[in-house]
Image: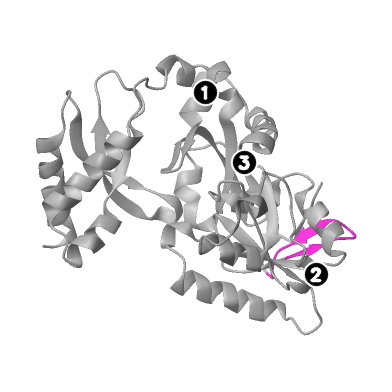
Amino acid sequence: MDYREFTGAVEKEIRKRMKGGVQASLYTTVKNNGKERTGVLLQAPGVHVSPTIYLEDYYQAYLEGKPIDRIAGEIECFYNSMRREVAWDCDQILNYEGIKDRIVFKLINTAANRDFLTTVPHYAFLDLSIVFYVLLEVTDEGTAAMVIGNDHAEQWRVETDTLWKAAVENGKTLLPAEFFTMNHALKEMLGETPANERGDGNLLLGETADKDGMYVLSNKIRSYGAACIAYPHVLKMIGQILRKDYYILPSSVHEVVIVPWAPELRWSDLDDMVTEINATQVAEEEVLSGHAYLYKWRSERLLAGRGLPAERRMG
């Protein structure tokens, strides 16, 4: 069974299982970097924000032997666990006052998203772009979010500057930056980080910071945390901690790796490292950039590579 046949079979099985008037249908959307993804859109009566559960990972499970009915059962359980008894009030989304405290931003690659960028308010950030979204909810299962399009901005009668100011302010509380050692990040990935060592939404460094040559910058929920490089004053604060220039390696849209400058490091070698990681370790839709950046801590400037927008002075 190929992927198209698989999605049709899952949709049919889900339809059999849904109760209470919930409708299931296949939905294909273009995600970050032009990547198409297909999922099951589940729409309940009276619910204005409906989830789409993407099927690529489930298809891999099918290829490894998991039957369709079991996959459909897992999707049903997941939907029921995330379903809200009280749906987001549509009036809140239609009204800027109802969502202004939940507007945040993320960074995406400009060249890979040129068509998408014509449909949304955005700012240029070197060779990247800042786009805005409404963070509706954060749970252990994931996040619910709505990208802000030109139609939303027109309906709300707000300019991009207004969205930027709101997003910067909201980021401090909803998605605060966290800066920690690579060792800490690896422990976190393996589930070995004690509760008292986990980030509390502030810039942080462990006691072994001066012994660790690489660091990670992300946000508290580790979702689209690469945007933290555009947070006012964050790069400056990291420079004051390290007391030297440093390279920024965009490992994905969710985080960046910080490498303190050293005479033996060559920018071109770090570019090659980013390219290799993108090709072998990062999903296509999660790639942010194909090269490293350099932050000059004394002059507070962020530099891109050759042939790219030259620099950005950071606050």
Q: CA distance from mark 1 to mark 3?
A: 26 Å
Q: Which residue is mark 2?
A: 210
Which residue type does callout 3 highlight? Leu
Residue appearing at x 17%, y 23% in the figure:
20
Residue appearing at x 15%, y 28% in the figure:
19
Quarter the N terminus occupies: bottom left
Query: Residue 301 vs residue 282: left or right?
Result: right
Which residue type does callout 2 highlight? Asp
> Does label 3 or label 2 sit earlier along the sequence?
3
Question: What x and y, as percent, mark residue 102?
Answer: 57, 29
Which residues lie in the magenta part? 294-306
Residue appearing at x 61%, y 69% in the figure:
291
Residue appearing at x 59%, y 59% in the figure:
193
In the drawing, what numbered circle is on residue 154?
1
Q: CA distance from mark 3 to mark 2?
A: 26 Å
Say which of marks 1 and 3 sits in front.
3
Q: For the residue labelled by badge 2, is the local secondary structure a helix, a strand or a loop?
A: helix
Question: What x and y, as percent, mark residue 187?
Answer: 58, 64
In the drawing, what numbered circle is on residue 53?
none
Give yes or no for residue 38 being in the magenta stretch. no
In the drawing, what numbered circle is on residue 175?
3
> Does label 1 or label 2 sit earlier along the sequence?
1
Q: Residues within 10 Å of mark 1 (few under 14, many from 20)?
A: few
Q: Is residue 168 above or below residue 36?
A: above
- In front here: 269 or 155? 269
Q: Is residue 124 above or below residue 157?
A: below
Q: Is residue 251 visible?
A: no
Choose top left, top right, bottom left or bottom right for residue 183.
bottom right
Q: How many marks?
A: 3
